[in-house]
Amino acid sequence: MKRKNKMSNKRMIIRLKKISFVLIFILFLELLYVGYSVLFHHSLSLYFDGINAVASAENFYVTVGSNNDNDYYYEKAKISKYNSKREKTFEKVYNVGYNSAYFGVLLDGDSIVAVGSYEKTKKEHDDSVRRALIVKYDSAGEIIFSKDFKLLDNSKFTSILSVSDGYLVTGQSIYQNTRVGSKVGGAILLKYDKEGNLLWTVHYGSNKTAVFNDLLVVGESIYTVGLDEGNLGIICQYTMNGEFITHNEYQYTDDIGFSGIVLLDNHLYVSGASHTNVDDTNALIVEYDLSCIQQNQVIYKNTGSTRFHKMIVDSDYNLVIIGVIEKNKKSTRHRTDTYTYDGIIGKYNSSLEKISVITYGDERDDFFTDLHLIHGEYLVVGYSSYEDGSYLSKFIRYSDALKILGVES
């Protein structure tokens, strides 16, 4: 009987050792899997840091955009301030909700006002829809107010302009799916007071595609530019109270539409891209009078698709403009198409005669998003992609002759 108990105990010990070994092995595999997952996740989660807009004062400037420098790799709206030596004095991330980005910025005295979009709730994050966002900061980067807005499923603010009694904002509020029938939404123009209270809203065009990308105030009129359904570039005129006056349509632009507007010699100049065929576009500047009647246009062609994005008027009363060239490189071996992007900067006179257009293509991809005239130099902002797949912010300083004076990341 004792021998049987000893044999039984011995078998039990052996069985327990086997079970312990199996459990330890499973735990080891789980730890190995977790470690591998973390490392693999980090290898797939490429770093992104981009600038979408810049505003400048006499001795400093600010930029807005987004990055994914957080544990969950969410895109987060950010605002950065630099001194006259281009040294960063602060950077603030809008760490509310889920994904977010800023697309426009202005300086209002000591305050900074940024506009963009964000996912406020878990449902919005799961559905990949956003609310439009306006945030006002003090000179130290502390939030004064934060307001969001939407009419339909998916909304964003694209640009902002300061007036004496508030802020004018453009953007979009559209259906994410194919629902129809609503009379609201599409391209939107809004006015806020200086405390962030919404004063009025107007909308224009298709509630599935229309967007206002930029705006300008001339006298007692607000001019907006953007896109309507069917790849129609649009320019609209409103009173200072948001009452519609007139509009004009351009056939046909790309799927961004008109993206920039400036005033020169009492005429309006609008930037964008015109469709040449199904695949390619040419960069475009269109001249309008103050009644939105087209006067002139110029097209810039290059290999692949080109577009002009934003522009300014310099001290010589020329148009200085930035954009992008998209080139399609076909691989017959793998039967796939790859695309590369180069930034472009150009200069035209008021008659839309080309003075110079320069291509910038130092990295794998280069995107120019905004520009300002600062101390006699053209400061171009944007971001570049590199061979490891990461994206980094970039500043390029150009001379009056469009010669590169410096490049900083």
Image (cartoon, helix red, strand yellow):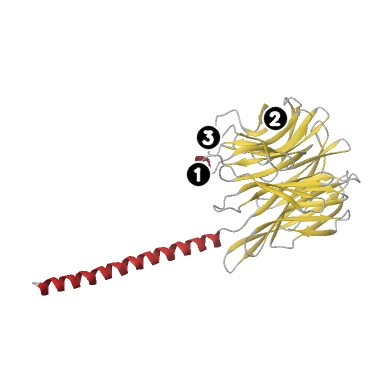
Furthest-front residue in this view: 2
Label 2 to label 1, Cα distance in Å? 32 Å
Q: Where is residue 231 in the image (x, y as percent from the top left)?
A: 66, 42
**Residue under the image location 81 percent in, 30 percent down:** 291
The label shown at residue 179 is 3
Residue pointed to by mark 2: 195
Name the kind of residue labelled 2 in the image: Glu
Which of disc 1 and disc 3 is earlier in sequence?
1
In this view, 333 is above or below 339: below
Number of labels in the image equals 3
Which of disc 3 and disc 2 is earlier in sequence?
3
Q: Is mark 1 on a helix, strand or loop?
A: helix
**Residue under the image location 61 percent in, 66 percent down:** 331
Q: Nearer the viewer, mark 3 or mark 1?
A: 1
Residue pointed to by mark 1: 126
Label 2 to label 3, Cα distance in Å? 35 Å
- Residue 233, visible in the rendered structure: no
Classed neighbour count for the residue bearing mark 3: other residues with Cα under 10 Å, few (<14), some (14–19), many (≥20)? few
Classed neighbour count for the residue bearing mark 2: other residues with Cα under 10 Å, few (<14), some (14–19), many (≥20)? few
Q: What element carries label 2?
A: loop
Furthest-right residue in this view: 316
Which of disc 1 and disc 2 is earlier in sequence?
1
- For residue 8, which quarter of the picture? bottom left
Work out which quarter of the rendered image holds the N terminus and state it: bottom left
Name the kind of residue labelled 1 in the image: Asp
Name the kind of residue labelled 3 in the image: Arg
